[in-house]
Amino acid sequence: MSRTTEVLSISLSPKEFNLISKLAQKEGRSRSQLIREALRQYQISCDWHYLQGIGERVAIRLGIETEEDVERIAG
């Protein structure tokens, strides 16, 4: 049977380690669960910023500057 997870070793300052431990305990999660959630949230943030960049370029190309411009174009 193969593993369904991989092990990652990271170095943290004592302050960072204590913060993760306290947050995990407060939320009733393991440190691993907390780190996985942080990674998911980071990926969501990166994806959102990427999409915002696309939206900004499209807005510039279409001359969209206000909410009224959006409504006008959307019809």
Image (tube, helix red, strand yellow):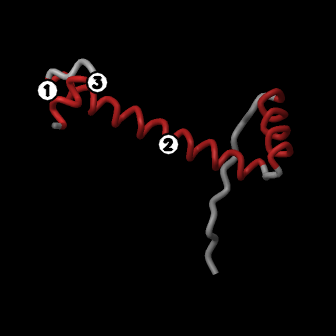
Left or right of residue 50: residue 61? left
**Image quadrant containing the C terminus:** top left
What amino acid type is highlighted by mark number 2?
Answer: Gln
Residue ranking furthest to the bottom: 1
Extreme residue in the top direction: 65
Q: Which residue is mark 1?
A: 62
Sequence-first tag of 1 and 2? 2
User: First in sequence: mark 3 or mark 1?
Assistant: 1
Q: Are marks 3 and 1 in contact (CB under 8 Å)?
A: no
Q: Quadrant of residue 60?
A: top left
Q: What residue do we see at 80% from left, 46% from top?
A: 27
**Distance CA(mark 3)–CA(mark 1):** 13 Å
Viewer-nearest of labels 3 and 2?
Answer: 3
Q: Mark number for residue 67?
A: 3
**For residue 43, which numbered disc appears in the image?**
2
Does the residue at mark 3 contact the one at mark 2 (Cβ under 8 Å)? Answer: no
Q: Residue at x 23, y 29 (%)?
A: 70
Q: Secondary structure at mark 3?
A: helix
> Label 1 neighbourhood size at 10 Å, few (<14), some (14-19), many (20+)?
few
Quadrant, the N terminus: bottom right
Rendered location of residue 67, percent (x, y)? 28, 24
Tell me where residue 68 sits by quadrant: top left
